[in-house]
Image: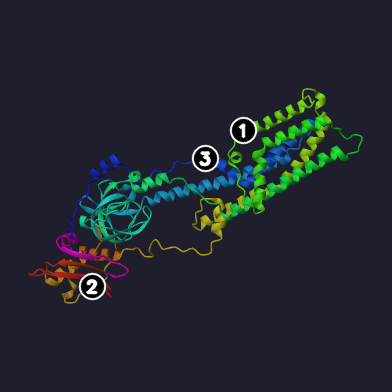
Amino acid sequence: MEQKNHRTGLTDAQVLESRKKYGENILTPPEKEPLWKLFLEKFEDPIIRILLIAAFLSLGIAIVEHITKGVGHYSETIGIFCAIFLATGVAFWFELDANKKFDVLNQVNDDDLVMVIRNNNVCQVSKRDVVVGDTVLLEIGNEVPADGELVEAVTMQMDESCLTGEPSIDKTIDPKEFEDGVTYPSNYVLRGTKVINGHGAMVVAKVGDATEFGQVAEKSAEMVEGQTPLNRQLDSLAKFIGVVGMVLAALTFTVLFVKDIFFNESPDAPQYSLGQLGLVGAVIIGAVIALSKVWMPIVYDAFELMGKDKEIPDSIENGGWFKWLGFGVLAFVVLVAIGYAFGVNPLEPTSWVSLDTAGHILQYFMVAVTLVVVAVPEGLPMSVTLSLALSMRRMLKANNLVRKMHACETMGATTVICTDKTGTLTQNQMQVSYTNFYSLHDQKLGDNEISKMIVEHIATNSTAFLDYSDSAKAKALGNPTEGALLLWLHSNNINYLDEREGTKVVEQLPFSTERKYMATIVESNTSAQPRKIMYIKGAPE
């Protein structure tokens, strides 16, 4: 095993120069969508879409009534639009506020502390402050802050599942033990991977977006979100309303129109010639084709509700509105040309129905549209949005932050949350209360062999460090228990680094849950005759 050497690390000037040259150790966040686009996304809700159609149809009816009768009823139209903008506005505001809080949480992740060697001292810096050339100390449980080459590795194993899928891979600095065919060199560690066994030190080679993790994050920045149960239920409800409303509207218009042609014996009943019916049919067929993007998805929804999987053709789903409008006009022109071939001249006013007859047909259409408008529950989106918004605010008070408002229904139904504690109930500043070393007179360290062996044991058989940045008080870094022992040496005016680097380490076994102890084999300097001694800490079985 290679002997450890104390490294001085970078100076403050070198840190600034490296950061200026290679940048900060942060991942560039994906480009945010503009606010207007986020607001328009609220209108993708299926119920909101149906309400929009109903609102515009209601507006059209009110305008026609105003033209024909001189009086238009716009109150229902205004009410529907108010319900739409109130529901979308509340949803937009709450989700925007939640996104701001999530951005703050993501920044906190870059402020996690890591151990580095700088200015000939072991200290802690935030992950974002790590620069190329830094010497980073790694222990069990640590997440690697950047890509770099190992300069120390003691029985080190890494979890690289986030990049390569390997849950456990050995790392070493001995070229004889390098593995062939691995994705990354055996002496190289990557940002985002975790130390699951052993400990070591690395020299940072890449930071930020230049790391492998950064490149993967850049390529996978697109977020794919599934629908919540509430979204699926509202989607099914919207499809049901759309199918039923469209079917009833079509049946109502057809029945009224057919009754007006064949079964209306009133002397004031409109009379239709064959040519007039043909031109009316051409107008209706052209309008049906032009509005294919509206009614065709409803037909496919009907198949889905009946349990038959039918996918909407791309030509309909992705086709533009102007494209289908052009198809509708083309169909109307073709049908008129066919009628002209049979003697129906569309340029003659008598070939078309009279204004009174057209008013009857328009009235039938308005009755059919009214059925669609009445079938849509205007208050449903508002009631759903308000209940979700209140749930979102209530969960926020309980320190549960939800990004998407519709996820409140799923999160609120959670009964058990399994999580691991992220801190401690105490100050996490362990100290040695008292010692009970056998053969040590008055429990005070001296210049005898027992005292030297105790100092060598504590300093060598440890992976913790002390931060001397604050001249008034040393700070323990790493394992709290091992740090407390090093602080005890410090209180006795003993520099643990001098003892640690002055001892030749033969082999070291880091602590593991399987062994339940840590052991370090050294060539002892406490005896005139050099010999190998094993220092054990823990409870060996």
Which label is found at residue 323? 1
Give the Cα distance between marks 2 and 1: 87 Å
Question: Which dot, 2 or 1, sits closer to the camera?
Answer: 1
Q: Quadrant of residue 298?
A: top right
Give the Cα distance between marks 1 and 3: 29 Å
Q: Quadrant of residue 18?
A: top left
- The residue that mark 2 highlights is 435
Magenta stretch contains residue 218 = no
Q: Earlier in the sequence, mark 2 or mark 1?
A: 1
Extreme residue toward the bottom, this view: 438
Extreme residue toward the right, this view: 267
Q: Secondary structure at mark 3?
A: helix
Residue 526 vs residue 433: left or right?
Answer: left
Give the Cα distance between marks 2 and 3: 63 Å
Start-end of magenta stretch:
494-517
Q: Position of residue 402 (x, y in %)?
A: 51, 53
Residue beneath the point at 62% across and 54% down: 233
Extreme residue toward the front, this view: 341
Q: Reply above or below: 225 against 294.
A: below
Most foreground residue, 531 or 243: 243
Q: Position of residue 154 (x, y in %)?
A: 24, 61
Q: Residues within 10 Å of mark 3 (few under 14, many from 20)?
A: few
Q: Position of residue 321 (x, y in %)?
A: 62, 35
Does residue 118 appear anywhere in the picture?
yes
Extreme residue toward the left, this view: 528
Residue 138 vs residue 235: left or right?
Answer: left
Q: Considering the image in quadrants, where does the N terminus appear?
A: bottom left
- The residue that mark 3 highlights is 35
Q: State how the image is colored.
A: rainbow
Q: Amino acid at mark 2?
A: Thr
